[in-house]
Amino acid sequence: MKVLIVEDDQFHATYLHEALAEALPEVTEIFHVADGAAGEQEARQGEIEAIVMDLQMEHRNGIEAARTIWAERPQSRILFWSNYADDAYLRGIAQVVPEESAYGYVLKTASRDRLKLALRAVLVEAQIIVDREIHRLQKRGTAPRSRLDDSEFDVLIDLALGLQDKSIAERRGMSLRTVQNRLLSLYDKLGVSSDLDEHLTLNKRVRALNRALATRTINIETLEAAQRDLKTWLARRR
Amino acid sequence: MKVLIVEDDQFHATYLHEALAEALPEVTEIFHVADGAAGEQEARQGEIEAIVMDLQMEHRNGIEAARTIWAERPQSRILFWSNYADDAYLRGIAQVVPEESAYGYVLKTASRDRLKLALRAVLVEAQIIVDREIHRLQKRGTAPRSRLDDSEFDVLIDLALGLQDKSIAERRGMSLRTVQNRLLSLYDKLGVSSDLDEHLTLNKRVRALNRALATRTINIETLEAAQRDLKTWLARRR
DNA sequence: AAAGCTTTTGCGGGTTCCCGCAAATATTTT
DNA sequence: AAAATATTTGCGGGAACCCGCAAAAGCTTT
């Protein structure tokens, strides 16, 4: 059995390597690359279907790499191994994972045993396993009062890219006013005006982005990825 | 000689530990804590004046910890050891470092020899040493066309927190129109409108924040720290 | 099919924002 | 000190934003 490690931190890669050898004796070959693009390449070339991948990497992050890998070989099993429990990553994964694919999500802070369990569950048994920690998603006070639905999330992304209401409406196929309604509920759920001083009125748009980042609803990688998506949409539109 | 390591990643802490033992035989004791607040505590208690510290940590980041440590013992020597070359960190350090203190800034991607050199230079020789990589300041195209001056940076912070022009003017002691002039040059330097499609007009405020994050001019930790500052300012104001 | 609830949409107006223009100040150069 | 240059400030207007209100369009539930 061949396994591919996609991880740009040398120490973490080494640790993974060891854990992998301990947990899965059936592994015969371990490949290692340090970024998403190389990961796609290697998976394609080596026909590797068991992958352990970091999420945050330069240029092409783990989710984008997973998208193309799954597009080419949907039966690939991917264990994401990340520093952060950002909701943004969960949503990103949910969007690209094919119906019947196996995947997992473990935090780097998890114990070695937990990691080894996840390695076996995902790479060998093709199960789906998500670290408890990640669903917790609720550092009191900072988290949004209630989860954003998909449509709100889309609008949030566009807002964060700097689009104005009209463009969002066009891109998402809603009326202007509906976009604004989404914004209202975003402002509410993100706690845009509850925060800070009572008598201080804020710029809601910027504050919404600020809060979305602070609550880990989106992060910089997802923004960068979203901008790439926007660019292809713009190109296609003409 | 006693050294304190403030680092929340277990692997990195271990690595540091080893490098420290190799590079500085004169070190007799190595303490280790995992976050900024504990770091302040430990430095105070143990009267430690040689510190190696990660920058990004939960709750209280490296710069904030450094501020209080230096406030109490300005002769402390601190080597910052970080994953990122964000301009935001450099500015933050520049703001809190006392006139005659020794400090250093090394990237985690630096070679072991480079790290060891920096350890000796800062902790023993009390020199100032900043990794070359950090001054390089980002890859072409994403970086701001020219560096922001301090006044622009202040306004950027306030904008990023969601303050509106009037509040920024009040906080920074400028007239409304001057704030707006700062914003104009921010928009220019951050490349707010040059980017993306020609015919797409953007919300400049949000886009400015987006670009500032993308270019690593500010990052989420600095935003969180800035918000704490804002809160104390708000409290003092009444 | 009618009644009841939710979501979408348009309208309108009060704010804030963006920014050109020109006068007032401040800073630098001669 | 005068002249030249740069920065700050006020004014004003068009555009975008925020959001209440009520009609229209989609849904569930009886």
Image (spheres, coloured by chain):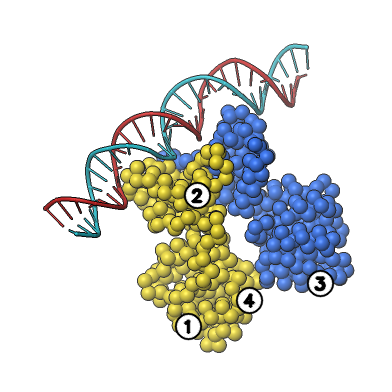
Chain colours: A yellow, B blue, C red, D cyan
Which residue position is annotated with label 2?
A191
Which residue position is annotated with label 1?
A124
Q: Position of residue A17 (x, y in %)?
A: 60, 78
Q: Residues within 10 Å of mark 4 (few under 14, many from 20)?
A: few
Quick check: B194 left or right of C10?
Answer: right
Q: Are marks 1 and 4 in contact (CB under 8 Å)?
A: no
User: The disc labelled 4 sits on which kind of residue?
Assistant: Tyr
Q: Are marks 3 and 1 in contact (CB under 8 Å)?
A: no
Q: Same chain, marks 4 and 2?
A: yes
Q: Residues within 10 Å of mark 3 (few under 14, many from 20)?
A: few
Q: Report the front residue among B215 and D27.
A: D27
Quick check: D19 left or right of A192?
Answer: left
Q: Position of residue A211 (x, y in %)?
A: 53, 50
Identify the secondary structure beneath mark 1.
helix
Q: What residue lies at 60% left-to-right and 41% top-to-bottom?
A: B158
In front: mark 1 or mark 2? Answer: 2
